[in-house]
Amino acid sequence: MTQELPEQGRPAGEVLRQLRDYGRDDPHYQDARLWSLVYYLDPAHAEFLNEAYQSYSSANGLNPSAFKSLKRFENDIIAATAKLHHGTPEVCGVVTSGGTESCLMAVKTYRDLARAKRGVKAPEMVLPTTAHVAWFKASQYFGVKVRLLPLDKQLRADVRQLKRLINRNTVMVLGSAPEYPHGTIDPIEAMGEIAQKAGIPMHVDACVGGFILPFMEMNGIELPLWDWRVPGVSSISADLHKYGFAAKGASTITYRDLELLKHQMFVYEDWPGGVFASAALLGTRPGGAYAAAWAAMQHFGIDGYRDLATFTSMAFDAMHEGIEAMPELRVLGDPKGPLLAYGSATPELNIFAVGDQMDKKGWHVNRLQAPDGLHAMITAQHLAVVDDYLHDLRAAVATVKSDPSLAGKGGAATYGMMAHLPLRGMVRSRVLDMFSGMYRAGGAPLDLHAPANSAAQPLLERLAARYVQWRQRR
Ligand SMILES: Cc1ncc(COP(=O)(O)O)c(C=O)c1O
């Protein structure tokens, strides 16, 4: 029984055995079956990160003057990141716990900056439709209204519409390099110019691209400019725990100068616990994550990251070409790497049903909506399996073509409903029911197909069935 604290402690070996056993049914990322969430190289690198992490796992970056080692790691990481992104010596920043924290912090910073400098009381920000969901979370958390920038035909932020969305309440503009859903790089130069003319800060979300695009460029791949070389850019987020191949829990947010970063900081001078200052969201900051991030950067260096970028680009090209060679599929948008998404090129082929077939073959593939698609976050590790993946994808397409009723079954029906049901409030409450179920006392695994017990459920199920019939008739 492990749901209770044992009366008497258990031997370390036994606990560790059980701990490992709990992971038995987790995705097999070591075999590159997973196309998101994990950036894994090999056992030797995992061991290296573990050792670096473990040597500082008790250290706390809460007070940066206590653990000088952690502040040194942070200084080194930020300075190297700024240089990699072509920053001036004034560029400064903070190591955060992940992309979401970096994005949240940018929104807080620019909300507070606009309040302080321009007295903005009803803050707004312009986000491309493809902005990572962390930005929508930040909108809710910090009360900053979103003005959505639509996409052009290539699924890039449509820069022609940016000007009309900026008004006196705008506190920031966002561009992504690349965006998560399709791997497209927004037109940062053009957006930066408009933002700068309007006197509005622009953040570049390079959580995915920050530690691979620079190395792809060094390898000779032509990419649009997105970093400090664009004058309108005022801050950049870049994750170390993605393409930096650090341990989980490490990202960076950098600003063009300290005057901007100051608005991110929190100071409370009247707390009975002492005068308190904090640079970002967290209180206790995990020393292990800083140490492992620093170690990864030192270990790879520019040549190591360039090698990783080369392998990733090879895997990306193979995927891109392999998918384009299937007449039933099309790559979405204009991805330059490292990730891509693909959808169905013919209305007869249900892409979510293709996803179900891929699941059956042991791949873990994320689903997209508007447009419907499947997603692949490609890393160097995938070079070894890309041919197997494409082989299985061809077979999955053939299976769905020969049995169109698969579109109305299993995950295809559920994802189809969630993506297309016009009553978005209902989708939201259904998802909230399912998701919160996992956090019920005692917990429960998420099962997208389990019947929900909310009062709205029968109607939802009826609508889902009608949606499936409607799709089949089209
Ligand atoms: C573009 C982008 N921004 C932000 C994030 C959030 O990062 P994290 O999952 O580390 O919080 C992601 C995650 O995939 C992302 O792709």
Image: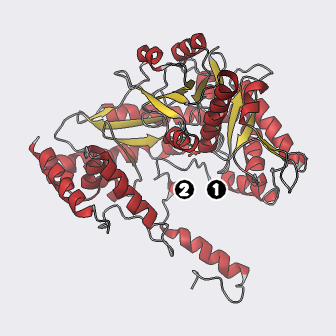
Q: Which mark is residue 64?
A: none
Would residue 306 be visible to someone looking at this image?
Answer: no
Q: Residues within 10 Å of mark 2 (few under 14, many from 20)?
A: some
* Residue found 36% across the figure and 51% down from its top: 428
Q: Nearer the viewer, residue 145 or 367?
A: 145
Instruction: State whether residue 354 is above or below residue 321.
Output: below
Q: Assess whether mark 1 and mark 2 are in contact (beta carbons under 8 angstroms).
A: yes
Horizontal side of residue 390 vs 397, given as left or right? right
Ligand 1: image quarter: top right
* Image quadrant where residue 47 sits: bottom right
Q: Residues within 10 Å of mark 1 (few under 14, many from 20)?
A: few
Disc 2 designates what residue? 30
Q: Quadrant of the N terminus?
A: bottom right
Q: Position of residue 270 (x, y in %)?
A: 84, 49
Horizontal side of residue 111 vs 145, given as left or right? right
Type of amino acid under label 1: Pro
Work out which residue is located at the far bottom of the displayed protein and give it. Answer: 7
Q: Which mark is residue 43?
A: 1
SS category of the residue bearing label 2 = helix
